Image: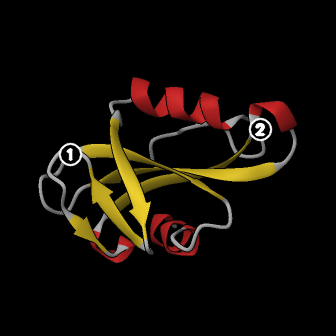
Amino acid sequence: MTDLAPEGDDITMLELERNLGVRGYDTEVWAEDGRLRCSACQHVAEPAAWTVEDVRRGSQATEAGGADGVAAAVRCPSCGTPGRVLVMADSPVVADLERLAS
């Protein structure tokens, strides 16, 4: 676990993104059609192929208290680069990311 934020804290997505960057998860990973793409090597794979080290829910800065985003600390299965996934809570990859992090 990367300890993105203490459980239960109301934290914004911006705070989660900054925290991931400080911990070395500064490479962008994009969710595309239920799969993840590494911006370092362009590898695309199902979430199950990735190492998911932590997942947290956060609110948008303008709507504190609403858990409408998800931040995940992941490692690319191809190049091993630590990266971050930032998606809306209703993204199709969220269930897989949360399952893989537990």
Numbered disc 2: secondary structure: loop
Q: Which residue is mark 1?
A: 81
Query: What residue appears at the point 79 percent right and 37 percent down from the top-left corner?
Result: 10
Residue 96 coordinates in the image, percent (x, y): 50, 74
In the rendered view, tell whether residue 69 sits above or below residue 36.
above
Amino acid identity at mark 2:
Asp
- Closer to the chain start, of discs 1 and 2, is 2
Along the viewing direction, whichever of 45 and 23 lies nearer the viewer: 45
Residue 69 image point, x, y percent: 67, 51
Which residue ends up furthest to the front in the rendered image? Answer: 33
Q: Nearer the viewer, mark 1 or mark 2?
A: 1
Helix, strand or loop for disc 1: loop
Q: Is residue 90 left or right of residue 9?
A: left
The residue positioned 35% from the left and 50% from the top of the image is: 29
- What colour scheme governs how the chains and residues are painted in the rendered image of this protein? secondary structure
Residue 31: quadrant of the picture = bottom left
Is 3 situated left or right of 27 in this image?
right
Question: As displayed, is residue 65 above or below residue 96?
Answer: above
> Which is more toward the observer, 15 or 101?
15
Q: How many marks?
A: 2
x%, y% of residue 45? 27, 72
Q: Amino acid at mark 1?
A: Thr
Residue topped by disc 2:
9
Callout 2 crowding tier (Cα within 10 Å): few <14, some 14–19, many ≥20: few
